[in-house]
Image (cartoon, grey):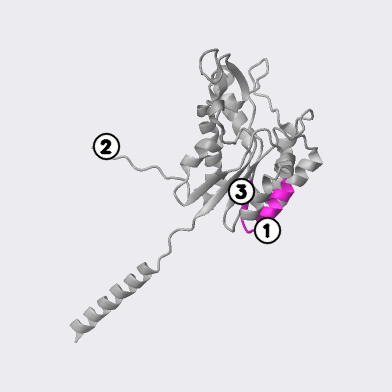
Amino acid sequence: MKWFLKKYSLSCLAFTLLVLTAFTFPPKHITVYLIGDSTMSVKEKKAYPETGWGMPFVAFMDSTVTIDNRARNGRSTKTFITEGLWQPVADHVQAGDYVLIQFGHNDEVKTKASYATESEFTANLNRFVNEVRSKKAIPILLTPVARRKFDAGGKIEDTHTVYAQLVRDVAAKNNITLIDLDKLSMDMLHQYGPETSKLLFNHLTPGEHPNYPDGKQDDTHFSELGARKVAELVLAEIRKVQPDLAEHIVKPKSVIIK
């Protein structure tokens, strides 16, 4: 009898495990939207080797994540709205998705049509944040990534002082996750120094690349190396400040050396 009961119990356990396995749901698929300017955007072939940091960012996420990079060259918070680039994101973002928001480069330049006053910039960021939250999705604010600008003493200069602080203020007021990419990238450039940091940007000598036969000296837009380094900064911060999203970062496989 004891033998029968034991066998019966094991059979019940096996059946229970089979049922639970049959009803195991696959991991939820999420979308991470990137909205911002040229420092983040996907580049046309004619711009290579200029690379937005959103391009290598894709490779670091696992198969449960779709990276939808909506960033566009030259856009500010104002033109991203007025040109109809924001509304499709607001319409399609779903609960559990993420929206990484990085503006400031073009908002702060008064001579550009994309210029947004400080109050407009703040209002636009608040709109992005509120509309993302209304869909039960998660907004993440990023301060604008640093330009390569060193003073005569070799110290990196902050070119986004006012607008980066506005982003910080909006994040603090709304209790929004903040990635202070301005500070992080300035620290990185300082470590590289005035000369070596050129490798991170679209600096080319005449004849070095067919897309730029006359060469290029661009201290705003990244090389492939620079874009990857910035993407790594963002990913490192996500691990610190957004652990749920960090779970989707590809984990390196262990290498066994025999």
State the extent of the magenta-drawn residues as a range. Answer: 125-140
Q: Indicate which disc, 3 or 2, sits on the residue closer to the N terminus.
A: 3
Image height of 49 relative to 61, above or below: above
Q: Secondary structure at mark 2?
A: loop
Residue beneath the point at 56% across and 36% down:
42
10 Å crowding of disc 3: few (<14), some (14-19), many (20+): many
**Which numbered dot is residue 257?**
2
Quadrant location of the C terminus in the rendered image? top left
Quadrant location of the N terminus in the rendered image? bottom left
- The reply, left or right, for residue 82 in relation to residue 237 is right
Q: Secondary structure at mark 1?
A: helix
Image quadrant assignment for residue 253: top left
Mark 3 and mark 2: Cα distance apart in space: 40 Å
Residue 129: say if magenta: yes
Image height of 7 relative to 116, above or below: below
Q: Which x, y percent locates residue 240?
A: 55, 45
* Mark in front: 3 vs 2: 3
Q: Are marks 1 and 2 in contact (CB under 8 Å)?
A: no
For this orientation, the residue located farthest to the bottom is 1
Q: Indicate which disc, 3 or 1, sits on the residue closer to the N terminus.
A: 3
Residue carrying label 1: 134
- The reply, left or right, for residue 116 in relation to residue 154 is right
Residue carrying label 3: 99
Image height of 130 relative to 211, above or below: below
Image height of 106 relative to 179, above or below: above
Q: Indicate which disc, 1 or 2, sits on the residue closer to the N terminus.
A: 1
**Amino acid at dot 3:** Val
Q: Nearer the viewer, residue 173 or 56?
A: 56
Residue 13: say if magenta: no
